[in-house]
Amino acid sequence: MKQVFVSVPGPWWTRLLYLHDTPIKLGVRVLVPLGRSTRVGLTVAAEGIPVENNSIKLKPITKIIDSVPPIPEELMKTMEWFSNTWFSGLGIASKVMFPTKFLDGEELCPLTEYEKNNPDNYRVNYIYEENDAKRYERYAEIAKSSSAGTMFLFSEADSAKKFWNLLPSGLKEEGIIWPTGATKQWTQWKEARNGNVKFIVGSQSAAFVPLKGLSRIIIEDENSGGWLTQKNPCFHHRSVLAARAKFSNAELILGGRIASSKAFMQNSECGKEKKDIQKRLIFVNLHDSSSFTVDAVKDSLPISKPLIRETLTCRENSKWAFWILDRKGYAGELYCRDCGEPLRCSHCVGVMRWEGKQKRLSCLSCKHHIPIPEKCPSCGGPFLEGVRPGLEALTERASLILRYKYKEVLLFQNESGKLPSCKSLIKDYPRGALVVGTRKILALTDELPTGMIGWIDADAEARITEYDAKARAFALLYESFWRGMDPERRKIVIQSRRPDRGWQKGLTRGWSYFWKTELKERKEWNLPPYSPMLKMVMPKGTGIDFAKLLDKESLEYWAAEESSDEIWVRTRKFSIIKKYLAPYFDIKNTRRGFPVTRLYLD
Ligand SMILES: [Zn+2]
Ligand SMILES: [Zn+2]
C-alpha cells in the first residue's frame, strides 16, 4: 500500500494521509473519507507540513477522479505559492482559485498538453496613463494584435464591462467577458481550459481561470485597494497574479492612472505622468476662506468663494458638479455644552452620529439609534450642540447658496453605498445638478459630464491612522482629476489647511514626486513595501503564548491595545512565522477556531 497526501478544502493547513494500492499522480482529484462523510481533495506533495499522527489507522482513498492532473502546472505552482505567501493552507488556496463544481468532483475531459511559453516571454511592462479612455484604447490595441491567450483584469466588474463594450464585435467573438453566476462561470471555465477562448475580460473572479495558451496578464488599476481582499482569506490579487505570470512565463502588464508603491519601488522609471494639471487645479487655504455657521452645530462649514464660483460656472454650462466630504449625517457628534461630554451609545459606548433628517443619533459601531434627547443624559443640561458638520448640513447650505440660480442639489449618502444609475440621473436632470456625498460619488463621473469637483476638507481624507493614509488620499484626489468622461476640461477645487504642502505637493508635481517622498519616509520607518506587516488574530486566549514564541526568535512584534490575541509582526522571516503558526492550523483545532491573518505588502 502507498501513502498519499491529500489536501481537502478547509481552513486548516493539515495535509491528510490516506492509503492506495498503487502510486497516484500529484495534483489529481480524489474522493476520500473524512469524519462521517466523504470529501474531494487534491493529491499533494508532503514536504514541510504538519502530518497526521501515523499511529492512527489510515483509511484508503475511496475513488480517483482524474486520470491526469486536471489543472495546468502553472496554476498548481501558483496555488502552492499562494498558500506559502499568504499564510493559508492549500485547501483555502484551492477554494479561492477553483470553481465549486471543480472541487465537488464534477467530471472533466482530460487536459490536453499546453504549449509552454519560452522563459524569455516573462517580463514586466507598464501602462500608466491618466486618461481612462486613452488607457483603455491601449489595452484594446493589445487585444487586437494578440495572437495568444491574454487576460484583461480590472479592479471593478463595471470597468471590465466598459472596456468590453469598447471592443469591435468581430474581436468579441474570440474572447469572453467573464460572467457572473456560478453556472455560467463553470461553463466558461471549461471552454477556456479546453482552448476555445483567446482572451478573457474580467475582474477578481476571473484571475485564476485556466486559460489555455496564457501568455499575457494585464492588471488594470493595479494601485487599487480592490485587489486586496477584505474578507478572509486575505490576499492581494496583483501579488498572486504576478507569481502566476512568472510560473506561466507570461508577460505581466501593470496599468492604471498611477503606479502602486510596490511597482514604483521596483522600477521608479515605470511611467511618465502628466504634469499639466495646474491650470485646472484650484487650491484654497481654509484659514483664509469664508465659512458658514450651521444651525445648532459649533463648527462652521468651509465653503470658499472659488468653490462657489466654479460650481456656478459649471452649472451655467449644464455640467455636473460634485462636492465631496468624508462625513455622513448632519454632524459628526452631539455633545453637552454644560458638562462637555459627548453623547455615547448606550449599548457599546461608541461614537454617535447626528442624523438630522431622521432627528436621531446613530451609533457608528453597532448601528443602534435613539431619538435626539431633550437634555444631557449625564448632567441634565439643556444645551446640546453638534460638532463637525456633515453632508446633510453641507447640502442644506449648498441649497441656500445656490437657491436663486439652481435648485438641483442632490445628496447621496445612504449606507448601502448604492448610487442611482447615471442614465436615470441624466433623464431626471438633463441640465445637470450639484451632487453632494462621500468619495463614493466619484464613480458617477464615469458617465456624467463633469464640470467641477470640490474637496470640502481635503486633509480629512488623509486623517485615518493607517500607514498608507496619505497614499490613499493622494490616489483619491488624483483620481478626481482623471476619472470618467472628458476629464481634461474639469476643474478641481481643493480646500485644505495645508494647501499644496505635504502629500498634496504631488498633485502639482506628479505622482512620481509623491512616491519618492512617501517611500523615503516608509523606508525610514521600515514600513511596507520595504518590510511586510502581518496581523494575526489568534484564537481566544492564545495570543500571549504565541507572543512568547516570537520572543524566542527576537522578532519585532506588538499586541493591539484592545486584545492580546491581536498581534502585529514586521518581518521578512515568513518561514519562522509559518513554523509557529502551523500547530494552530492543525485540523484538530477545528473546534477552537483558527488564527486569522492579514498581510500588508505595500
Ligand atoms: Zn451634560
Ligand atoms: Zn453602539
Image (cartoon, rainbow, N blue to C red):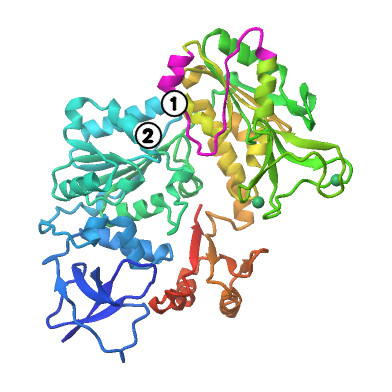
Q: Residue at x 42, y 20 (%)?
A: 424
Q: Residue furthest bottom?
A: 55
Q: Which mark is residue 601?
A: none
Residue 337 position (above or below residue 213): above
Question: Is the residue marked by circle 2 packed among few (<14), some (14-19), or many (20+) residues within 10 Å?
Answer: few
Which residue is under mark 1? 446
Magenta residue check for 414: yes
Q: CA distance from mark 2 to mark 1?
A: 10 Å
To which quarter of the image does residue 135 belong? top left
Q: Nearer the viewer, residue 307 or 214?
A: 307
Residue 502 seen in the current view: no
Q: Is residue 402 left or right of residue 445?
A: right
Magenta residue check for 179: no
To which quarter of the image does residue 458 belong? top right
Q: Nearer the viewer, residue 335 or 58?
A: 335
Q: Is residue 403 left or right of residue 211?
A: right
Which residue is under mark 2? 158
2 and 1 marks in contact (CB < 8 Å) = yes
- Residue 267 is situated, as x and y percent measured from the top left of the image, at 46, 46
Q: Amino acid at mark 2?
A: Asp
Residue 283 position (above or below residue 115): above
